[in-house]
């Protein structure tokens, strides 16, 4: 990625001037502090998710205009990662063409194996490999939905909803905001055809990303609560309910805790975390399990607890909670990578450069492709190089790897 990539603060300043705002005027319009605007523009403070959304709304630009996503693909690996996006767009666009457009897909068993392979790539944040298989898989599964009936159609639809979920994750990671909403709609369509209540819940969980992107936390919480109510009505969690349902219910509560913390709702955050902990106690052996692409159990609850403390502007509390965490060896590297990025952000807030750098390096080792395109990770590296006069060789090397400039 180019060393000339502009930092977030500079992008905010440029868009602010184009819109005709002074720093004080932008602070008033966005309902943020003047000090925050000044420090973010100077590269001395990490912008929070809420700050970016508020400023983007005031400037009438997408958040991605401020973060610079999707980031330029300059290395061969990055080019391979971004190349399949056009194929995904094509599959999304053609989802409802007449049945005579499609050719017969491969046998269901082969398609199911490919979906499992794609899921493994997603969990390990192997985005280039994931992107390589998704366009063809989406085309074949869409054909299966249109060319079969009854149980076969429902099975194809369930696999297609999974493929849409993974394509959504890839588009989100790479910053293709215009594609995300389309994929959410397609996933809801496929999940409905599957007649699988758990897949419908996953589709609503995924749909919440669009609400998050626009800072509509109340709307997102309503979507998540409705999805959870449907699962709770279908079957209670008492009496040894099946693990996939517990995993989905717990994951919905964790997503709700994220929205509540972004909305600075401390009581709501704690309520949803407490409910997730209660459900986590029902997971056998106290070890996280993976169902319907959702990893749920005590470890993931603890990770969300740390992230919530960061969003609630309690960095000391986040660092204290993170210090006692021990991850199971099979925990998804993406989940661990997200965690270390969040902890690095907390250390920046506490003015602890070396600790922030240590956690960024951990995120890089665990999930390099995720970390490299993670906006918070990139901006953390940029703030660290800008804020301190004496930049260590380790920090310089990391900033170069991210492709960010001082």
Image: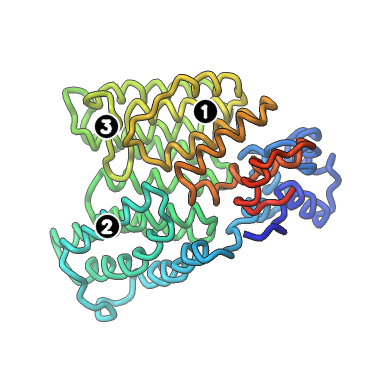
Label 3 sits on a secondary structure element that is helix
Position of 200 with respect to 93 (left or right) is left
N-terminal of the two: label 1 or label 2? 2
Which residue does the numbered mark 1 point to in the structure image?
A: 308
Residues packed near mark 1 inside 10 Å, few (<14), some (14 to 19) or many (20 plus): many
**Spot occupied by residue 383 in the image (x, y as percentages of width and height):** 70, 40
Answer whether residue 229 is visible to the viewer in this image.
no
Q: Residue at x 25, y 59 (%)?
A: 157
N-terminal of the two: label 3 or label 2? 2
Which residue does the numbered mark 2 point to in the structure image?
A: 115
Residue 162 higher or lower than 221, as above or below: below
**Spot occupied by residue 284 in the image (x, y as percentages of width and height):** 21, 26
- From the image, state whether disc 3 or disc 2 is nearer to you: 2
**Spot occupied by residue 306 in the image (x, y as percentages of width and height):** 50, 26
Q: Residue at x 72, y 36 (%)?
A: 45
Q: Seen from this angle, which residue lies furthest left? A: 151
Residue 234 higher or lower than 199, as above or below: above
* Image label count: 3
Q: Kindly indicate the quadrant of the structure image that contains residue 190.
A: bottom left
Position of 364 with respect to 5 (left or right) is left
Residue 88 higher or lower than 99, as above or below: above
Which residue does the numbered mark 3 point to in the structure image?
A: 246
Residues packed near mark 2 inside 10 Å, few (<14), some (14 to 19) or many (20 plus): many
Residues packed near mark 3 inside 10 Å, few (<14), some (14 to 19) or many (20 plus): many
């Amino acid at each position: 990625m180019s060393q000339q990539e502009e930092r977030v603060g500079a992008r905010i300043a440029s868009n602010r001037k184009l819109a005709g705002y002074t720093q004080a005027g932008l602070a008033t319009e966005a309902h943020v502090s003047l000090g925050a605007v000044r420090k973010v523009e100077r590269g001395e403070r990490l912008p929070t998710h809420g700050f970016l959304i508020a400023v983007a709304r005031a400037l009438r630009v997408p958040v991605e205009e401020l973060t610079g996503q999707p980031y330029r693909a300059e290395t061969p690996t990055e080019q391979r990662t971004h190349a399949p996006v056009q194929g995904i767009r094509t599959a999304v666009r053609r989802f409802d063409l007449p049945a005579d457009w499609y050719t017969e897909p491969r046998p269901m068993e082969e398609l199911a194996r490919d979906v499992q392979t794609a899921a493994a790539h997603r969990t390990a944040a192997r985005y280039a490999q994931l992107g390589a298989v998704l366009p063809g898989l989406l085309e074949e599964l869409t054909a299966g939905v249109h060319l079969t009936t009854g149980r076969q159609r429902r099975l194809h639809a369930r696999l297609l909803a999974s493929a849409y979920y993974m394509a959504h994750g890839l588009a989100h990671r790479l910053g293709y905001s215009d594609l995300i909403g389309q994929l959410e709609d397609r996933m809801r369509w496929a999940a409905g055809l599957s007649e699988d209540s758990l897949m419908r819940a996953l589709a609503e969980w995924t749909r919440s990303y669009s609400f998050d992107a626009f800072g509509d936390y109340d709307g997102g919480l309503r979507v998540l609560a409705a999805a959870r109510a449907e699962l709770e009505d279908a079957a209670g969690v008492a009496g040894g309910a099946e693990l996939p349902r517990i995993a989905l219910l717990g994951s919905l509560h964790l997503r709700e805790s994220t929205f509540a913390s972004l909305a600075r709702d401390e009581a709501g955050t704690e309520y949803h975390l407490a409910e997730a902990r209660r459900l986590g106690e029902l997971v056998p052996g106290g070890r996280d399990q993976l169902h319907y692409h959702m990893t749920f159990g005590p470890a993931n609850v603890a990770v969300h607890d740390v992230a919530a403390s960061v969003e609630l502007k309690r960095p000391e509390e986040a660092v204290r909670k993170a210090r006692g965490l021990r991850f199971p060896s099979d925990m998804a590297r993406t989940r661990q990578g997200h965690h270390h990025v969040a902890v690095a952000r907390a250390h920046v807030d506490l003015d602890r450069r070396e600790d922030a750098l240590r956690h960024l390096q951990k995120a890089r080792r665990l999930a390099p492709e995720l970390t490299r395109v993670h906006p918070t990770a990139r901006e953390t590296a940029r703030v660290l190089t800008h804020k301190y006069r004496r930049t260590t060789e380790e920090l310089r090397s990391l900033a170069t790897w991210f492709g960010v400039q001082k």
